[in-house]
Amino acid sequence: MKINLSQQPTSIEKLYSVAQDIKNSVKDINHSIENRDYIKGESFAYLPFDENQIIKLLEFKKKIPAKDLKRVVVIGIGGSGQGTKAVYEFLRSHKKLVPMEFIDQIDSEKISNIAKELKEMGSEDYLIFVITKSGTTTETLYNFELLQSNIKLNPERIVFITEENSHLVSICESKKYHVLTFPKKISGRFSVLTAVGLAPLALAGVNVIKLLEGAMQQVNSINSEEENLPLLCAAAKFVSKRLINENLYPNRHFGELGKWEKQIFNESLGKNENAMFTSFGNFYLELHSSLQHYLNSKHIFLNTVYLKDSTSLILKDAEYLAKNFDQTDTEEIQRAIYTSVLRNLSKNNVPTISIEFSDDREKDIGEYLQFKMLEVYFLAKLMNVNPFDQPDVNSYKENLTKYI
């Protein structure tokens, strides 16, 4: 994965200067890694190095017959499922994976359809993950009970994932459900590299070791001033004072990644009236709907991602409509469009950070996830907000039972 900061107007020297203001944040992350503990929110950066969680994952896989697995169902909302969904959607066009279904909202039609599919399978053909950090998430627990009321589920094919010391652990054990835990200090939206993401992805066929290798590589880079790109990108956005942080992805397989990034930025940073709002769109579609706005807006900070077309097709013997592009393959024309747009953005002084993925997709997506978690952490420190809580979101949960 390559990151290019050259198309944002702030000098690198200025970014280094801004980064110095929060240099202790890098020390805090290193402290969590060196101590191998989970006593602070910064411990999310230690996850790729934690050998114990890999051992537990391997032990878990041994318990679960998965040779003929036909369906993995993930029931979870927000950080309990979105990171997993993002990785799965990104990789499933690249390698053969077990089909996954995600129940991430109250959706009776979807639950009915999944129940019908599971009824047609053998009792060991499916695996259901129920993920709730607190053990009390209303939507998740309701959806699980709703699914269970429509089909008699095999308890040995149900896995609950929750935080350590959750009240759910003893309940799951009494019901003969499998249970996996992750550290209480890891916020839900920072949990994709815990059992929350690793267990479902591993059972679906993702090489989670490569995922963690990419994440590990990104964490190691923060100890070099020149290579600490998460901090430099955070500094660039902080200095820009732009109100909208827009992510442009190259194809439909990035849509769920955009939703994950939207959550982790907005929920972590949206704690004052001047907070930057993060959104996302498809690069090529936005050229015909939003580029006019991008080129003239004083509020946009753009992040663009480029991924080489792995199934490139060649236009052969064009007769009329596209004769200027005869013998041009799809990767070549995509690259030309991308380059042209970036130059136009630069000409109009639109601050842009561009990221290019390599062909090593599992490693790259792990690196990207960790890069974004570090970036939002550093940006929160520059903004002087706590990236790990969401006090205003909790208010709707506290009042929910009043209206039922």
Image (cartoon, rainbow, N blue to C red):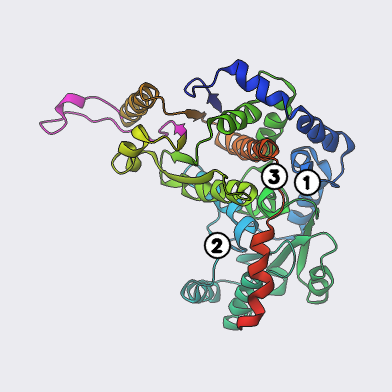
Front residue of 298 and 180: 298
Highlighted range, magenta: 302-329
Q: Give the foreground label among 3 and 2.
A: 3
- For disc 3, the marked residue is 385
Mark 1 vs 3: CB contact within 8 A: no
- For disc 1, the marked residue is 41
Front residue of 361 and 18: 18
Quarter of the C terminus within the rendering: bottom right
Q: Is residue 372 above or below residue 272?
A: above
The amino acid on which the numbered mark 3 sits, given as a three-letter code, is Val
**Residue 116 can be seen, yes or no:** yes
Q: Label 3, label 2: how many angstroms apart (C-alpha)?
A: 32 Å
Q: Earlier in the sequence, mark 3 or mark 2?
A: 2
- For disc 2, the marked residue is 102
Quadrant of the rendered structure where residue 14 is? top right
Q: Give the foreground label among 1 and 2.
A: 1
Mark 1: secondary structure: helix
Mark 3: secondary structure: loop
Q: Earlier in the sequence, mark 1 or mark 3?
A: 1
Front residue of 44 and 126: 44
The amino acid on which the numbered mark 2 sits, given as a three-letter code, is Phe
